[in-house]
Image: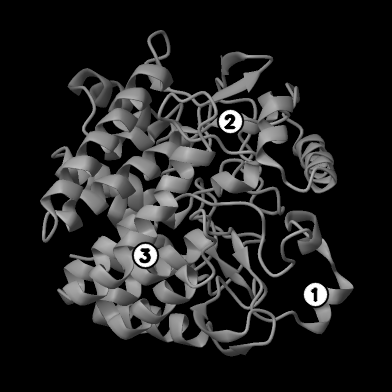
């Protein structure tokens, strides 16, 4: 097991980017997802800090504060930060679709799942550095306040995302439904996303207008579960030195958890489904994806847990040779499309496995969590640290190799 930890640290160090950014006039230090994805991605960085906080904490602290260094006054933190634009970035200008040129071209106008609160708690658990927590916790809380104040147009305590990329699961087939793509052709959804970005660019990413027109207003199960977990983490950290803040965060997180249970739970399917908004109404996105299982990480009703476990263990749905597929196997949209770049159409991912395993451990499903952990570790041993894997035979196909967040597997080692 120490050998695997050594390989993980070697990979993470090999993917380090650091220096001085002329774009943003400051020093930077971060670990890129891989050599192709050169820039700093938000939730990738959050996962990296979770791992490095165990292996080499100073790396975690540097990356964490680099991520926070571009925070806007309203608390916003971007999906991607372009610390350095390379020659190839000027040849392939994909990134210009996702920035608000009116403000800056050096980071995207989108967000990603708010793992950052969890990351701060993990850094503290592994370092006991309370001064680091105190130096950064208000900035982290400010980001969660941005989500509450700017991304909850219907004021139901749930955060809305405005593009599929904000979920971190870009082409998940649940988003096909929002675009009217009921045949689940990923080419159609990709085309619709490009049209969406063109409109946002035309509107200068004006959130008020975006929510009013509502081309893509989704309350996503996994995003909001991670949001709730982040608030739990802040609550735990504030309990160390600020009781009034602890109380405030406890009330806030309770509201979010209550809404997740009440609004996402489908009584007929016995599963959680995301919602999309159209013309003032809410509609469930009834595609069984990994997102549907995410509330297993929360203190939800026991009968909900029992039903989610049944779905997870069903060979027709989420149980495969290498679980957990990102789409249930009995869904028409299940690919898994491992040999394409149509992502999240059924492939198995280390980061989502990490969340579900942690949830199973919390609820006392030790045997099941160990079984999934064992199969996840087997993937790494057979195919190394890849972006994703085929849930049926483990093969990574066209996944990126030497993928940094897959080092989360060291969290599963006994």
Nearer the observer: mark 3 or 2; the answer is 2
Instruction: Return the residue at label 3.
Output: 408
Q: Residue at x 67, y 74 (%)?
A: 36
Q: Mark 2: give few (<14), some (14-19) or many (20+) Cα within 10 Å.
A: many
Q: Would you say 203 lies left or right of 343 here?
A: right
Q: Position of residue 280 (x, y in %)?
A: 63, 14
Q: Secondary structure at mark 1?
A: helix
Please indicate, yes or no, whether residue 114 appears anywhere in the rendered image: yes
Instruction: Return the residue at label 1.
Output: 89
Instruction: Return the residue at label 2.
Output: 218
377 vs 354: above or below: below
Q: Residue at x 64, y 76 (%)?
A: 38
Instruction: In the displayed orientation, state which residue is furthest to the bottom.
Output: 19
Q: Mark 1: give few (<14), some (14-19) or many (20+) Cα within 10 Å.
A: some
Please indicate, yes or no, whether residue 368 appears anywhere in the rendered image: no
Q: Nearer the viewer, residue 392 or 42?
A: 42
- Rendered image quadrant of residue 132: bottom left
Q: Earlier in the sequence, mark 3 or mark 1?
A: 1
Q: Position of residue 274 (x, y in %)?
A: 51, 26
Q: Secondary structure at mark 3?
A: helix
Q: Would you say 37 lies left or right of 257 here?
A: right
Instruction: In the displayed orientation, state which residue is furthest to the top.
Output: 268
Question: Pointers 1 and 2 in contact (CB under 8 A)?
Answer: no
Q: Nearer the viewer, residue 412 or 391?
A: 412
16 vs 236: above or below: below
């Amino acid at each position: 097991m120490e050998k695997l930890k050594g390989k993980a640290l070697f990979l993470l160090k090999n993917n380090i980017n650091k220096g001085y950014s002329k774009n943003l006039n400051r020093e930077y230090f971060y670990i890129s997802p891989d050599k192709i994805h050169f820039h700093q991605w938000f939730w990738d960085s959050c996962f990296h800090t979770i791992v490095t906080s165990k292996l080499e904490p100073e790396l975690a602290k540097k990356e964490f504060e680099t991520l926070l260094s571009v925070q806007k006054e309203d608390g916003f933190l971007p999906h991607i930060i372009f610390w350095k634009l390379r020659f190839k970035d000027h040849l392939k200008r994909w990134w210009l679709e996702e920035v608000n040129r009116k403000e800056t071209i050096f980071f995207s106008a989108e967000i990603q799942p708010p793992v950052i609160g969890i990351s701060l708690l993990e850094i503290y658990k592994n370092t006991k550095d309370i001064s680091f927590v105190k130096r950064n916790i208000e900035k982290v809380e400010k980001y969660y306040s941005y989500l509450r104040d700017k991304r909850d147009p219907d004021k139901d305590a749930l955060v809305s995302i405005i593009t599929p990329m904000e979920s971190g699961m870009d082409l998940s087939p649940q988003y096909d439904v929002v675009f009217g793509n009921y045949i689940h052709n990923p080419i159609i959804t990709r085309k619709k996303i490009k049209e969406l970005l063109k409109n946002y660019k035309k509107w200068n990413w004006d959130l008020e207008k975006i929510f009013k027109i509502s081309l893509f207003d989704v309350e996503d199960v996994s995003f909001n579960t991670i949001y709730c977990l982040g608030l739990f983490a802040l609550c735990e950290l504030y309990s160390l030195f600020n009781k009034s803040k602890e109380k405030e965060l406890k009330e806030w997180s309770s509201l979010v958890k209550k809404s997740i249970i009440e609004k996402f739970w489908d009584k007929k399917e016995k599963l959680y489904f995301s919602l999309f908004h159209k013309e003032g109404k809410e509609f469930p996105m009834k595609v069984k994806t990994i997102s549907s299982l995410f509330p297993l990480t929360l203190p939800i009703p026991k009968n909900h847990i029992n039903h989610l476990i049944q779905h997870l263990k069903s060979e027709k749905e989420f149980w495969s040779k290498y679980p957990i597929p990102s789409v249930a196997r009995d869904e028409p949209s299940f690919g898994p499309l491992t040999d394409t770049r149509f992502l999240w159409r059924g492939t198995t991912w280390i980061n989502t496995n990490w969340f579900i395993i942690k949830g199973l451990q919390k609820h006392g499903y030790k045997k099941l969590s160990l079984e999934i952990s064992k199969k996840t570790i087997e993937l790494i041993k057979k195919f190394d640290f890849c972006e994703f894997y085929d849930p049926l035979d483990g093969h990574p196909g066209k996944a990126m190799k030497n993928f940094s967040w897959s080092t989360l597997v060291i969290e599963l080692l006994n």
